[in-house]
Image (cartoon, rainbow, N blue to C red):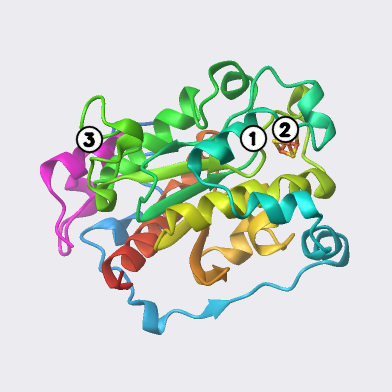
Amino acid sequence: MRWTDAQRTMLREMGLRLWLPGTDAAAAEPAAGPSSRVAGVGALADPVPTPLSVKAVVVAPKPAAVAAAVDSPRPAAAEATLALDWPALRAAVASCQACGLGASRRQTVFGVGHPRAHCMVVGEAPGEQEDASGEPFVGESGQLLDRMLRALGLSRAPAVPGGAAGEAADPARQVFIANTLKCRPPRNRNPTPLELSTCQPFLERQVALVQPRVILAMGRFAVQSLLGSEEPIGKLRGRLHTWRGVPVVVTYHPAYLLRQPADKARAWDDLCLAASCLDTVPG
Ligand code: SF4
């Protein structure tokens, strides 16, 4: 992979430093952000995505509490959700009161992006700004996510202005972004395993409709919902997992990266791993 000027600009905006093989690090391009020159970032120079075939496909073991919530038999309403089309799914989410979060939300946060995007981003639960706007990943962490995606040539925005949900845009250049939970937990508290499992059929249906080639699971609760694992992100990232047959790449949530910019380099490695799926998985 060769970086274009635009991609190099995006990487600098993420606070990541680029230098070419054989280049004196001291003379390398200055990074724009406070996190310049973090450990391991030298590997960012023209990285070669690792082919799928040499990556371990791992299904993480589920702790008993999480497994019980995630694997419990589906109620009839959940089964019905798995047959909905996009408009019916959106309406079902908007009116849902299946868990207690329905009572305290301002609005549901359904998800945005191309309905057949090759890459799907799954975040955690809506925060205050998402609850107010109805869109996932807004504010500073959303801006960081957008810069990360742009560095890979991806966008959450429809490429054709006014295109219905971006359908006219190239699905290979777009993402679909959804949260694990569609409603904000009060005071941004952590979601419970029961809330995650109750809301999961909506996410599962979104994945089935989008049919992504790769899912980028951002943050602990996205991982808990998709993989049923409570392992730390640091132990799960760096290799491929699967969920319902779809490759899953685990990475840090942008909100975490804003607090811990030294981990941006690892997050970039994760994005490159996801990009390798887009390059190699036929579809
Ligand atoms: S979080 Fe999910 S399951 Fe709970 S009320 Fe909202 S949409 Fe329904």
Q: Nearer the viewer, mark 2 or mark 3?
A: 2
Q: Quadrant of residue 9?
A: top left
Amino acid type indicated by mark 2: Cys
Q: Compared to 232, does 14 lie above or below?
A: above
Identify residue for label 3: 159
Q: Position of residue 157 (x, y in %)?
A: 32, 33
Q: Compared to 187, does 196 lie above or below?
A: below
Identify residue for label 2: 96
Mark 2 residue's CB less than 8 Å from ligand 1: yes
Assess whether mark 1 and mark 2 are in contact (beta carbons under 8 angstroms): yes
Q: Main secondary structure of the magenta part?
A: loop
Secondary element under disc 3, as helix, strand or loop, is: loop
Amino acid type indicated by mark 1: Val
- Please state which of residues 224 and 110 is positioned toward the viewer in this rendering: 110
Mark 1 residue's CB less than 8 Å from ligand 1: yes
Query: In which quadrant will I find the C terminus?
Result: bottom left
Disc 1 crowd, CA 10 A, few/some/many (<14, 14-19, 20+): many
Question: Which residues lie in the magenta part?
Answer: 1-30
**Farthest-out residue, bottom:** 53
Question: How many labels, in total?
Answer: 3
Query: In which quadrant will I find the N terminus?
Result: bottom left
Res. 93 mark = 1
